[in-house]
Amino acid sequence: MKVQRIFALMLVFFVLSTAAVVASSIWGDFKGYNIARLVVNDKTSEFGDSDVPPLIVDGNTVLPLRAVSDALHALVKWENSNKTAYLYKPNVHLFFTTEVRKDSAIVPFGVVERGKEADFIVFAQVDNLKTSINSVKVSIVSPSGKSVVTPVVKSIAESKESFWLKVPLYGVSFDEEGTYVVKFAMKQDGASDYSVVSEKQIQSE
């Protein structure tokens, strides 16, 4: 009887341990920590083999700052001298127009007939920019993920907290049906790449 009880207890322990292992390995492990999945607006964030994924540490979910900044369309900066990470979230409002008179939008632009080619202007209203930038970049991605135009880069001679900017785009072809995404990116002083801080859609029907 005693042997049977010990065997039963060992069996229960094995089942519980197996369940715990299965539960902890749904998304895998990273250096001894359970991996969590990050979903932003119903889109699952992907992490490469060299990236640090979201982790569960002592019952808390720890997210990599770069992934969070990309999801929030924010700017991130690392100061190695004082081991401090800075996160900046400027307000960037985009709108499009096909005709401008004295910097006033006359004809709003947001829907285009499939197969058409269009010239339009991207207006950006920026405020709450708490870090210095040296340039911005505007690009367009098709529904299939292809770059539609050569990205337009505009230098910023004097970085300000609030400013308006207009970027004309010419001969943009809308050959696919679906959602085109206009991306507005900024490059911080000292940074090597751009970070997208705002996106706006154009529908091709």
Image: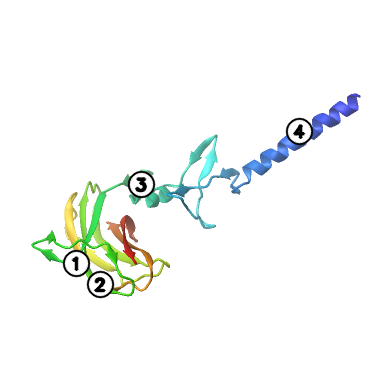
Sequence order check, earlier mark of 1 and 3: 3
Residue at the far top: name it: 2
Q: Quadrant of the C terminus?
A: bottom left
Residue type, mark 3 in image: Ser
Disc 3, SS: loop
In front: label 2 or label 4: 2
Sequence order check, earlier mark of 2 and 4: 4
Up/down of 176 relative to 53, above or below:
below
In front: label 2 or label 3: 2
Up/down of 39 relative to 6, above or below:
below
x then y, percent, for residue 90: 26, 48
Label annotation for residue 98: 1
Label annotation for residue 118: 2
- C-alpha gap between disc 2 and disc 3: 48 Å
Q: In this view, does 154 lie to the left or right of 56?
A: left
x then y, percent, for residue 14: 76, 37
Sequence order check, earlier mark of 1 and 4: 4
